[in-house]
Amino acid sequence: MPLFAHPPTIRTFDSDCRAAGIAKVDARGRVIDIHALRTTFATHLAVAGVHPRITQAAMRHSRMELTNTYYTDPALLDVAGAVNALPDFAAPALPAAEAAPHST
């Protein structure tokens, strides 16, 4: 059973990709299709810092899992940048007099 009620839409999309010189499968093995456009949309929203719940609503997904697991490309997310943006949680160094154990 076809996914879409109007298969010509898919044929038109595929034809347009061919005319534009866009390969059906990219170097990472990802297929270019309608869902790839949705993945691009969700991933760009994530990179822009849009709250995941807003992205879920924009994608009209019933479950956050669809948005985060299937429609956001983790290879394009700046994980290192996010970790580096965290505040410094290290305790400030104590002066030597305070750091020495007290004798009683």
Image (tube, rainbow, N blue to C red):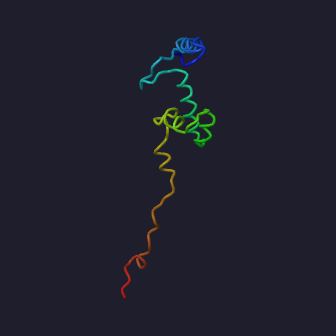
Q: Residue furthest bottom?
A: 104
Pinpoint residue 27: horizontal percent, then vertical percent: 42, 23
Rendered image quadrant of residue 51: top right
In the rendered image, the quadrant that contains the C terminus is bottom left
Q: Residue furthest front?
A: 1
Pinpoint residue 73: horizontal percent, then vertical percent: 49, 34
In the image, what residue occupies the spot 51% across and 14% down? Answer: 21
In the image, what residue occupies the spot 57% across and 34% down? Answer: 44
Horizontal placement of 73 versus 8: left or right? left
In the image, what residue occupies the spot 60% across and 42% down? Answer: 53
In the image, 62 versus 80, the foreground residue is 62
In the image, 63 versus 54, the foreground residue is 63
Rendered image quadrant of residue 13: top right
Pinpoint residue 3: horizontal percent, then vertical percent: 54, 19
In the image, what residue occupies the spot 49% across and 39% down? Answer: 77
Q: Is residue 30 above or below residue 80?
A: above
Pinpoint residue 32: horizontal percent, then vertical percent: 50, 21
**Marker count (numbered):** 0
Q: Is residue 58 above or below residue 82?
A: above
Q: Is residue 54 above or below residue 91?
A: above
